[in-house]
Amino acid sequence: MACRASDRRAALLLDLVAVTPVYRAGNRTHMVARPQDPRASKRTPGPDLAVGVFGHWRAAVSRVARAAGSAPSRLAADVWLTSITGFVVRPGRVMAADDQRPSLLVSRTGYACLAAGAVVAAIVTFGGGLGAVAATTDAVWLVLWAAARFAVMRLASGEALRGRVPTLTVAWAGGLMPLILAATPLLNALAVVASAVLTWRALRAAGAGTRETTWVVGWAFGGQVAVEILAWIVRGGLIYGVLLGR
């Protein structure tokens, strides 16, 4: 019995000895880092590229914000806003002022609005499927009509107002600001009406008489309206004639 008990203890010890390396090996296996999936270890460039682009964009926005937040930039923005608001609300503050800076800012803003309106009109026309030729034609006509109005204003002005070219120029250029909205024919018509009102008020604020101002603005803008109406009538007549011919 004693021999059997000792044999059992010896067998049990042998089993423990045999199992222990496996257990230790198991511990060592868990302590070593598991190999990762090669597909997971590959870094995709998409997220990194997006993060990089966002970082550059944020830095650019920060620089613009810092520049806009500087005192000279705020002062320039205040002067510009005051000049534009004054021309629209009380044009006498701009037209009769001794300082030429408000008039210069109004003129430059009008030129910028004319250019932007021509670009927007071309984009809308081209986006409507009418082609590049029609889009270019709309943009060119918008600019040509604006130039024609200035020429008519100078021709229709009296001697006193004709000699005040800077006054005519500021009144005409300030009246160009609504043209930034001239993206469609309807908006263009509304912009022309608004332009006529601004031009009339600017000339009156500059000291021109009511009769002369009405005469000048009426010829400049009324001539455009008359020509466009005549063009529509001729175009409609041609289309009607073609339809009857069929």
Image (cartoon, grey):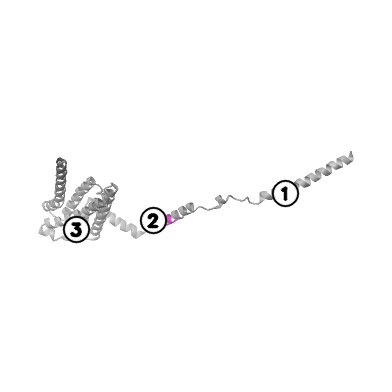
Q: Is mark 2 in CB contact (under 8 Å) with mark 1?
A: no
Magenta stretch encompasses residue 72: no
Sequence-earlier tag: 3 or 2 = 2
- Of residues 216 and 36, the one drawn nearer to the viewer in this rendering: 36
Residue 24's disc is 1
Q: Is residue 76 left or right of residue 223?
A: right
Q: Mark 1 against mark 3, which lies toward the viewer?
A: 1
Quadrant of the frame with the N terminus: top right
Label 3 sits on a secondary structure element that is: helix
Residue 162, percent from left and from top: 13, 59
Q: Which contiguous range is marked in magenta?
A: 55-65
Residue 133's disc is none
Dominant SS in magenta: helix
Determine the CA span between mark 3 and mark 2.
Answer: 35 Å
Looking at this rendering, what residue extends furthest in the front direction? 246
Pointer 2 residue: 65
Determine which quarter of the picture holds residue 67.
bottom left
Q: Is mark 1 in CB contact (under 8 Å) with mark 3?
A: no
Quadrant of the frame with the C terminus: top left
Amino acid marked by disc 1: Arg
Looking at this rendering, what residue extends furthest in the top direction? 1
Sequence-earlier tag: 1 or 3 = 1
- Of residues 97 and 84, the one drawn nearer to the viewer in this rendering: 84
Residue 174, percent from left and from top: 22, 54
Residue 215, percent from left and from top: 11, 52
Residue 169's disc is 3
The 10 Å Cα crowd at callout 1, few under 14, some 14 to 19, many 20 or more, is few
Residue at image location 75% in from the left, 47% down from the top = 20
- Of residues 28 and 190, the one drawn nearer to the viewer in this rendering: 28
Magenta stretch encompasses residue 61: yes
Determine which quarter of the picture holds residue 80.
bottom left
Label 2 sits on a secondary structure element that is: helix
